[in-house]
Image (spheres, rainbow, N blue to C red):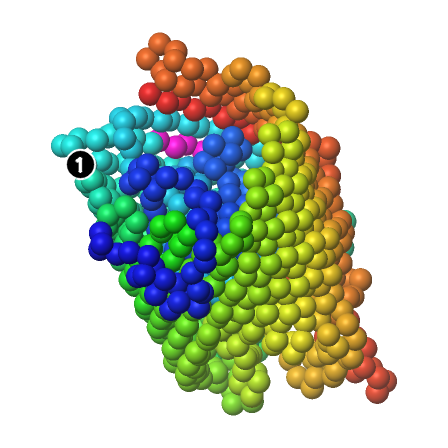
Amino acid sequence: MKNLNFGGAALLAAVCGVCPGVYAAESEADSSAIRLHDIEVSANRAVRTTPVAFTNISAEEIKAVNDGRDLPFLINQTPSIVTTGDAGNGIGYSGIRVRGTDASRINVTANGVPVNDSESHRVYWVNMPDLASGLRDVQIQRGAGTSTNGAGAFGASINMLTEAPSLERYAEVSASYGSFNSNRQTVKVGSGIFGDHWSVDARFSHIGSDGYIERAFSKLWSYQGQLAYRADNTLLRLLAFGGHERTYMAWDYASKEQMEKYGRRYNPCGEYTASDGTTAYYPDQCDNFTQHHLQLLLNQGFGQYMRLNAALHYTKGDGYYDQYKTRRTLEEYGLSNFTGPHGEEISKSDLIRLKFNDNDFGGAMLNLNYKRGRVDASFGSAANWFCGRHFGKVKWVRNYVGPIDPLQEYYRNSGNKFDFNIFGRADVAIWNGIAAYADLQYRHIHYTIKGVSDNFDWNTASMSVLDIHRDYNFFNPKVGLTYLNGGHRAFASWSVAHKEPVRDNFTDADPQHYPEAERLFDYELGYSYDCRLFSLSANLYYMDYKDQLVVTGQLSDTGNPLSVNVPDSYRMGVELQGALRPAEWFDWQLNATLSRNRVKNFVEYIYEDEWTNPISINCGDTPIAFSPSLIMGNTFNFRWQGFDASLQTKYVSKQYMNNARSEEALLDSYCVTDLHLGYTFKNLKGIKELRLGFAVYNLFNEKYCNNGYSGAGYYVEDGKNVIYRYAGFAAQATTNVMGAVSLKF
């Protein structure tokens, strides 16, 4: 390998679809000076020569705002991002959208290993509490991005790197407390190098909160541990992280009428009428889930120019949610009608059900990188396997006469998925500051779902049977050019991306109209300039979709958004960024995204009583649901000796929660400002660092909602169809505070 010359590099570049150029490219750093522990699985990372719009967020930036909120809220100030939270205060179930695309279209990896759930394609941050405390940095790529492992990126990729092995011994303790009884305790320790080669790092965290929304509490525990071996050209890591969460449901949200009657913090989840006629709330209306991630990561250098990244990974998830349902038809749950206390036949009753999810996910990945002079080329492959088991049980039925102990199982199905991809990528300097880029990926997916669904088929008077077999073969090419000259950077790129439907697209769909795979043509054009005093950038994008699965605004009974294919749709816009650094103690950062997001010739289908006899309404070109046309972020940062302060403002324009542009489903615009204050003491007696922090969230007490759902139906009256619409809104906390302290030894 040491004797691999430019001819071998040229051949590799040609295989990746790029011919070698004629000048030496600007290097990120002298490869001989790169320390091994700084080299991570980076096959899907972008650098300056990559024709991709991206933002890097360092551990220091995350640490400055990290007091226990979920990661989406810690990176909220990056361009085109909108965050959501069920509990209203950023702890518990949280979500993220980029360029209007929801979490199931955002590819998330940790050290190159997929984090997205294989079936839903979503990332449940609540299953990885306080992951931010164990991260080295985060890169967000907007658009199709580079070739990724796992679910296809249809709006963005989030690439996380966990902390590198410790070189020196350390111990850290941090704690925070604030409004709504929100609290976090974190302990981190590291051995430093021992035995010339080994190191151990560990983190344990607890996060709790009562939530802003009534009863929307969170009880979260997490861990992260790492055993590392290093030699001159070898870094081997065994990494484990995971957590357990217990959160009270808040995903039903509240209507505007309910908020006016009961207040903004009203939570309809778990509500029922007790036997004495009073309103009561089921205390165990909770989601309970445990997830463990295990990664074996190898970085092996071969001489000065070549390195190998390889990984084996396994994720185990197991849990259930406990849910009170009112006035449910017993037949739907495989239960017989029974005789009531007055001799009447009871066919509907209140009940408590448990829905379980037990899944296994594992795989292997390999990436070989060659970097010398004008050529930076990679070749990689990955194979992943997933098995998800879903089943439900009836725990209790009000006044039921008959056996339901042990728990009555009413559905069971399993999904099996095999995902294989192979890619070649090359970045080649060709002439006078111009670099050519090519990225070719082939991806194969085999997906089956078998068993009995949790949806009752009224036509057959039985649970729906699932027997789904799908194979997908995707070819995803990406090409582009980048120009670098001092602080100037310009790029143009064209990418193709495909994405298979998720599990809910099949289980909640009409069997006669199962969903199709999606295709994206992504066109990007960008320019940036960076110097000591200021920086600015502009990125134009046009994302042309075929058969895009767009959310309808409706939710499944598990709180996940429902989607339908639309034949033609697009997203287009401009992302603007600027920063001013007039002094070492002050900088001003500003970003704005102006976009137009449309479904072409959208047809809305509305069902009688939301179940049968659909009618259609031609709506023309309509805004895509949850896609605001203007997103802005503004940050003022101050630093003076040990003191630091940050004033952050986020503006999100109005957005519709369905694709029909109905006013009932309108989320109003909002503008929220947060203030972060901190002071760091260095080298105190026996303490390397002591930091005190204080944050005021929603400084100006904005009353806003950042998420919700909508639905529609009709009934027949006097021979005419009468359409009705409804919506629920995720209210967010008014002014609230958090205080934090951390010590490093």
Q: Residue furthest front?
A: 22
Horizontal and vertical percent for residue 369?
A: 33, 55
Furthest-bottom residue in this view = 460
Determine which quarter of the picture holds residue 734: top right
Amino acid type of disc 1? His
Mark 1 burial class by Cα count in 10 Å: few <14, some 14-19, many 20+: few
| Image spot of residue 236 (x, y percent) | 23, 46
Picture quadrant of residue 509:
bottom right
> Dividing the image into 4 quarters, which one contains the C terminus?
top left
Give the camera-side residue of 96 and 81: 81
Q: Secondary structure at mark 1?
A: loop
Question: Label 1: which residue?
Answer: 197
| Residue located 24% across and 48% down the image | 303
Task: Give, as a single range, the part of the protein colored magenta.
Answer: 183-187
- Dividing the picture into quadrants, the one containing residue 697 is top right
- Asked whether, in this view, residue 540 is left or right of residue 12, the answer is right
Q: Is residue 152 left or right of residue 651?
A: left
**Residue 219 visible to an observer of this rendering:** no
Q: Residue at x 60, y 20 (%)?
A: 585
Q: Residue 490 vs residue 145: left or right?
A: right
**For residue 322, above or below residue 603:** above
Q: Is residue 428 rendered magenta in the image?
A: no
Name the foreground residue: 407 vs 61. Answer: 61
Q: Is residue 538 left or right of residue 454?
A: right
